[in-house]
Image (cartoon, helix red, strand yellow):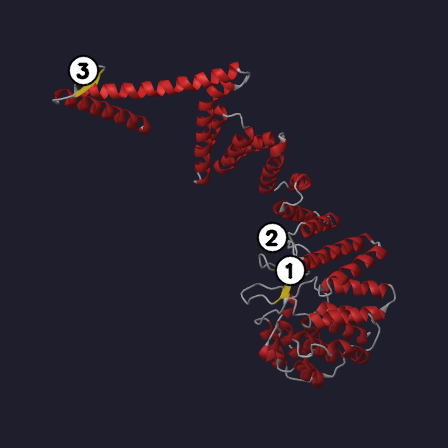
Amino acid sequence: MLWSLIKIVLFVVVVAALALGAGYLLESQGGVQVTVMGSEYTFGPLQSVIAIVVMVVAVWVLLKLISLGVAVLHALSGDETALSRYFDRNRERKGFDALSEGMMALASGEGRVAMAKAAKADRYLNKPDLTNLLTAQAAEMAGDQRKAEETYKKLVTNDATRFVGVRGILKQKLASGDTDTALQLAERAFAIKPKHEEVQDILLGLQAQRQDWSGARGTLSAKLKYGNLPRDVHKRRDAVLALSEAKDVLDEGVSIKNQEKAIEANNLSPDLIPAAVMAAQSYIEKGKPRSATRLLKKAWETTPHPDLASAFAAIEPNETPAQRIKRFVPLTRSNLQHAETRMLLAELHIANEDFPEARRALGDLVETDPTARSVTLMAAIERGEGAPDAVVRGWLARALTVSRGPQWICGNCQHIHADWAPTCENCEAFDTLAWKTPPLTEVAMPGGLQMLPLIVGTAEDQIPEDDMIDDAELLDADEEPPVVVAMDQEKRA
């Protein structure tokens, strides 16, 4: 309504200006004299303006007639499309102008305007590959998903635009959460353009979500082949996929294949802790304890981890605590000052009831790098040396306030996981979990409180029930017992 009123006002203003100008010219004196072949023609001011306008129009008509004449001559000489090109030239100009305006509107974020310009361009041009692409993108910007999908389907029918159409529908299905259809579309897009990096990443992510580890390894190899992935990153991620294959085979109960996949994963990336643990388990199943020992020692030299220590303990499950301390020497002699090594030694000596040696092994760790696990170990040492119950409870109370220590944390969304997984359970990103300490503001899993049930259990007989801190409630029921708890249980048995 407002735009119509503005147009009416502009029209009135233009008419008024022309009338004012014509009146001014009529009142003006003088004119223009033209001599043609001895004859003089005198034009007044208004007549001069009209003559100029007529002359311009006449020149424009003459040029058009000349162009038409040229087209007719070409047609008479055998060019059957000369006349059609002549009459279509103006339509093409209007169509390309509308297309250009639509692209500018799309770049400016005006989805509705871009759709209107695309429709106008489609009326003048016979180029559906251009107009349909503009229409689909404009419809997406305007929020008209149905129109966008219909247009993308039109693009799929054309060989030249099939990839664009499939990719557009793929993006829509991903946005709507239809991952099953999205996976099929990603496979189709990958078949059309296997070098396309975005399609490779989408397909890899969807295959990882569906746990299609074999297909994901093929996609990963394509990324390496076409130069979209560094070789070292490919080696690491291929190891993650091989490890995932091994875990799947383990779930199915096919131990031979599991062993092969686990060992393959460890060979691809020796620093991948879960792969080293599973490969060690495979060697143990094969009756090769030396191979398992050598593998775990190599992994421990790279990154000390409690899962590696548990796997090392599983090589000889029936040994005494003293025998275990001796057998662990080749493992603990490397990275001796690492916090994980010091806590492991403390656990081993606690299990052997050598509490002074456990204190020496732990050293000043509770002061320089206190974690729930190291502080709880100190409580166990104090309890073993006969310290007052108040001292033990003090250490336990401190264990609730310090850092929980390293956890499996997603580098993409910072989500904390209880166990390693190839994809983040929160953001579904692939190969983003790392073993590191979260900020103190994060709510960490109680992975460092493994010693707490043992300590509270042995202290119950001497601490009044009303004065006890119910620390056991802080433990996760599914948490696996640490090496020291397992060894202490064996000793009691």
Q: Earlier in the sequence, mark 2 or mark 1?
A: 2
Report the disc number at residue 40.
3
Q: Nearer the viewer, residue 485 or 365?
A: 365
Is residue 297 visible from the viewing direction of this image?
yes
According to the picture, the residue beneath numbered tag 2 turns out to be 427
Q: Residue furthest front?
A: 38
User: Which of the 4 image quarters holds residue 357?
Assistant: bottom right
Q: Amino acid at mark 2?
A: Cys
Q: Residue at x 66, y 61 (%)?
A: 418
**Decide: marks 2, 3 in contact (CB < 8 A)?**
no
Q: Residue furthest right?
A: 287
Is residue 459 visible from the viewing direction of this image?
no
Q: Nearer the viewer, residue 176 or 190?
A: 190
Disc 1 is placed on an element classified as strand
Disc 2/disc 1 C-alpha distance (Å): 11 Å
The percent coordinates of residue 173 (x first, y second) are 61, 39
Which of the two discs, 3 and 1, sits closer to the camera?
A: 3
Disc 3/disc 1 C-alpha distance (Å): 96 Å
> Seen in the image, is 88 located left or right of residue 211?
left
Q: Residue at x 49, y 38 (%)?
A: 141
According to the picture, the residue beneath numbered tag 1 turns out to be 433
The percent coordinates of residue 342 (x first, y second) are 68, 78
For residue 31, above or below residue 238: above
The percent coordinates of residue 100 (x first, y second) are 45, 34
